[in-house]
Image (tube, helix red, strand yellow):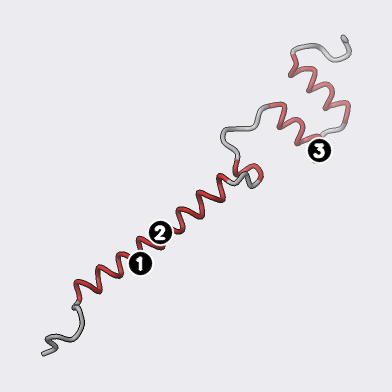
Amino acid sequence: MMYGYGPGWPWMMLMMLLWIALIAVIVWAVIGLVQCSGGGEHGRQGRETPQEILDRRFALGEIDADEYRQARAHLAGREPGSS
C-alpha cells in the first residue's frame, strides 16, 4: 500500500481543474482585451453606418468619384447635381 505518499488523487484532480480554470480565464481575458483595444473594425461596438461603408468602398477603389458623390448625395437626402 502507498499510505502517506503524497496528497492522493482528489488533490491531483483539484489541481488539474484549477489549471484548466486558470487557462480559461487567461484566454477569456486576452480575447476581451483584443476586442476592446480598438484593433480595427473588430474592436468597434455596433455596425458600420452607411456613410462609413461608402467611405470605405471609395477608399478601397470599389467605386469611382462620380458614384461616390451620387451615393453621398442620395444618403444626404438630396438629388445629385441639384446644389
Identify the amino acid type marked 1. Trp
Q: Earlier in the sequence, mark 2 or mark 3?
A: 2
Label drawn at residue 28? none
Q: Secondary structure at mark 2?
A: helix
Residue at the disc numbered 3 = 59
Of the pair 37 and 74, the residue shown nearer to us: 37
Residue at the disc numbered 1 = 19
Q: Position of residue 8 (x, y in %)?
A: 18, 78
Label drawn at residue 24? 2
Q: Are marks 2 and 3 in contact (CB under 8 Å)?
A: no
Residue at 47% in and 53% down? 29
Residue at 71% in and 32% down? 53
Identify the amino acid type marked 3. Ala
Of the pair 15 and 73, the residue shown nearer to us: 15
Q: Position of residue 4 (x, y in %)?
A: 14, 85
State the separation of the CA atoms marked 3 and 1: 47 Å
Q: Secondary structure at mark 3?
A: helix
Residue at 64% in and 32% down? 48
State the separation of the CA atoms marked 2 and 3: 40 Å
